[in-house]
Structures are given as structure tokens and as C-alpha cells.
């Protein structure tokens, strides 16, 4: 209540001042059309001010509830990415990837180099939580010919939708570098939730950092943390 009054003190002062000013001029000038005495005007001032202030408070409460509901919906639609590099031969391996529900994006380099016949590196991207689907997903992956990234290439891919608990496999082979297993510097992803919130995901393999940026208009909410290399093994599905 105090915060509402503090944030709207100008409007409240104006609401209170108007009937006081009217009463002052009418009573001072003794206007012939004036009805009622001081008690009547005091009662009117009380009812008038109380009604306006109550209306302002009710409006602010309704707006706050609407804002909180919007924030809740946005949080429910937010999902998080897990990205890691894996290596396999698509032609020889019967089982590949980390999830049963998975897709390989057919990039130009992947097709031109006939990478399905060779042991190739892939970025495995899995999303957890959030809505059943996110849309307009753009991926950019910066790779290099060596660990110093003296020569680099940017692998770009796009999918119109990305389902929950689905795995997207992005081939890291590069025609420019002539490599099937280049060094990976960074992956960037950008997508939209059904609540029309823009999300950016950045994971640096050099700095060992991972960041999710949730963008709604001019507001940004950032979740960032360090990543640690983890060795793991997985049985065939």
C-alpha cells in the first residue's frame, strides 16, 4: 500500500487538491449557485478522495497481478540447452546420439564432404523444460583448424521448431577447413518461445562458460555459469 501511494503521490495530491480548490473559490466568492454548507463539502471531499484513491489502488493491484501472471507464463515457457560434442560414424554405428528422439541437420559441408561415411564430430544439443516446442532456432558454431584457431569457419544451421527432450545433432565438419573433426571455439543459439520471448544461448569451449539470456523487449534476464569438462560413457539405446 505504501509503495503504491509513494509511486502515485502526484495523482493523489491532485485528486485531493481539486475539490479543496473548488470549495475554496466557491465559498470565498459566495457563488449564488452554491449548494450546501461546509459540512456537506467536507463529506463530498471525503467520498470523492476515498473513491478515487481506492480506484487507483485497485487499478495498480490489477496491473501487478497481470504482470505477475505474464512473468509466470514466461518462466514456464523457458527451457535450457545442454550442448556437448560427440564423435561417431553415421554409416557404421547403429546407435548414435544421446536421445532416442534425434535429428541430424544436413549442412552443406556435411553433404559435400560425404561425412556420413566417415567418423565425424557433431554438436549434440538437447533442451530441457519449458514449452513443448520452441521456434525459429538459429545456430552458429565457430570452429578452427587447430587449438589456436589460426583458421576459422562458422557453421550455421536453422530449424523451424525444436521439441522438448529432443536432440539436435549439428555436424561440425567444414569444407573451408577440410576437416571432419575441427576444434570448437563456441556455439551460439537464438530462438523464440511460444510466449514470444527471445532467448540466446552461448557456450564457449575456450572460456568454459555457458550463458542463457532471456530477452523481453528491453529487459534481459541472464543465467551464466562455468562449465567443467566431464568424461562420460553411454550404452547403446
Image (cartoon, rainbow, N blue to C red):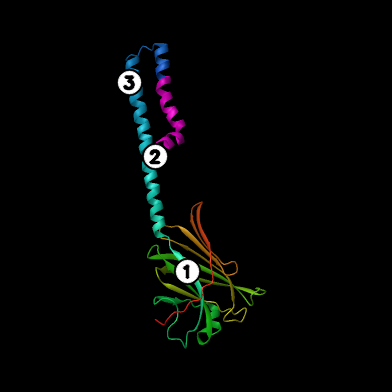
Q: How many labels does the image show?
A: 3
The percent position of residue 14, horizontal first and vertical second, equals: 44, 27
Mark earlier in primary sequence (3, 2): 3
User: In this rendering, is residue 221 above or below 164?
Assistant: above
Q: What stretch is highlighted in magenta?
A: 1-21
The relative height of residue 33 versus residue 217 in the rendered view (above or below) is above
Q: Nearer the viewer, residue 210 or 187?
A: 210
x%, y% of residue 132? 37, 65
Q: Residues within 10 Å of mark 1 (few under 14, many from 20)?
A: few
Alpha-carbon span between mark 3 and mark 2: 26 Å
Residue drawn 60% across and 69% down? 206
Left or right of 132? Residue 200 is right
- Left or right of 62? Residue 111 is right
Q: Mark 3 points at which residue?
A: 43
Label 2 sits on residue: 60
Q: In which quarter of the image is residue 112?
A: bottom right
Q: Answer above or below: position of 140 versus 112.
A: above
Q: Where is residue 71 in the image (x, y as percent from the top left)?
A: 41, 52
Q: Which residue sits at x=41%, y=76%?
A: 99
As helix, strand or loop, the secondary structure at mark 1 comes to: strand
Cα separation, mark 3 vs mark 1, equals 66 Å
Residue holding disc 1: 82
Amino acid at each position: 500500500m505504501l509503495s503504491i501511494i509513494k509511486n502515485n503521490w502526484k495523482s493523489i495530491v491532485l485528486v485531493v487538491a481539486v475539490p479543496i480548490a473548488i470549495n475554496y473559490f466557491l465559498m470565498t466568492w459566495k457563488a449564488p449557485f452554491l449548494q450546501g454548507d461546509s459540512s456537506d463539502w467536507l463529506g463530498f471531499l471525503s467520498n470523492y478522495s476515498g473513491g478515487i484513491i481506492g480506484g487507483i489502488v485497485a487499478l495498480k493491484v490489477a496491473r501487478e497481478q497481470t504482470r505477475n501472471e505474464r512473468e509466470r507464463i514466461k518462466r514456464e515457457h523457458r527451457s535450457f540447452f545442454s550442448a556437448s560434442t560427440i564423435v561417431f560414424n553415421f554409416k557404421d554405428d547403429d546407435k548414435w546420439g544421446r536421445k532416442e528422439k534425434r535429428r541430424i541437420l544436413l549442412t552443406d559441408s556435411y553433404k559435400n564432404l560425404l561425412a556420413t561415411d566417415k567418423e565425424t564430430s557433431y554438436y549434440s544439443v538437447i533442451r530441457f523444460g519449458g514449452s513443448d516446442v520452441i521456434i525459429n532456432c538459429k545456430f552458429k558454431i565457430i570452429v578452427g583448424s587447430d587449438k589456436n584457431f589460426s583458421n576459422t569457419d562458422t557453421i550455421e544451421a536453422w530449424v523451424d521448431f525444436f521439441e522438448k527432450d529432443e536432440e539436435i545433432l549439428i555436424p561440425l565438419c567444414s569444407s573451408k577447413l577440410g576437416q571432419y573433426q575441427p576444434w570448437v571455439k563456441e556455439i551460439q543459439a537464438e530462438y523464440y518461445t511460444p510466449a514470444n520471448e527471445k532467448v540466446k544461448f552461448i557456450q564457449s569451449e575456450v572460456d568454459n562458460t555457458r550463458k542463457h539470456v532471456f530477452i523481453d523487449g528491453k529487459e534481459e534476464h541472464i543465467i551464466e555459469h562455468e562449465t567443467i569438462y566431464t568424461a562420460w560413457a553411454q550404452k547403446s539405446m
